[in-house]
Amino acid sequence: MTVLRIVPNLPTRDPAALARFYAQIFDLEVEFDMGWIAFLGGPPQPRAQLQVATEGGSGTELPALTIAVDDLDAALARLRATGAEPVYGPVTEPWGVRRFYLRDPDGNLVNVAAHSDAR
């Protein structure tokens, strides 16, 4: 058996609105909207990945998901353009990842991360 993908499901009262939030910040496309669930997509990923942890690192709360980006400053600017601010960071962690946390409009904690050699 081969795992083809792992997809997080974030709880929300308004899937279309939350999908627009993520699309605006991360250049994702709403690929399918059934009313009760919306699917967002981006560029194909080279592998499936699942993380399990007791915390988010540096003593932080465990985020619901991590979104890796190539330009953290651009993601941060897009977040701020929505009127929101990060709830943690931006910070370069001791393990070499630059990141910030955001809380989406439905309260889900999201880790937005880039390798420290990325912008």
Image (spheres, helix red, strand yellow):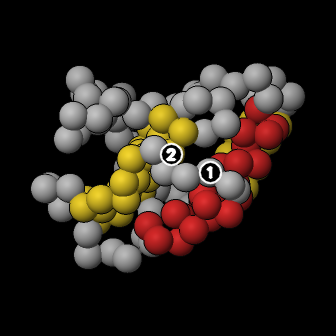
Q: Which residue does the image show at 49% across and 51% down from the upper left? A: 86
Report crowding for label 2: few under 14, some 14 to 19, many 20 or more residues within 10 A (C-alpha): many
Residue receiving disc 1: 84
| Position in image of residue 90 (x %, y %) | 37, 59
| Position in image of residue 12 (x %, y %) | 69, 25
Q: CA distance from mark 2 to mark 1?
A: 8 Å
Q: Which residue does the image show at 53% across and 58% down from the upper left? A: 44
Residue, far left: 94
Q: Which residue does the image show at 86% across and 28% down from the upper left? A: 35
Badge 2 element: strand
Residue 86 relative to residue 32: left or right: left
Q: Hey, what amino acid is under mark 2?
A: Leu
Q: Which image quarter is the C terminus in?
A: bottom left
| Position in image of residue 79 (x %, y %) | 60, 58
48 and 103: which is toward the camera: 103
The picture quadrant where one finds residue 116 is bottom left
Q: Which image quarter is the N terminus in?
A: top left
**Eyeballing the image, is 4 above or below 68?**
above
Residue 29 relative to residue 2: left or right: right
Q: Which mark is residue 102?
A: 2
The picture quadrant where one finds residue 33 is top right
Question: Do tag 2 and tag 1 residues touch (Cβ < 8 Å)?
Answer: yes
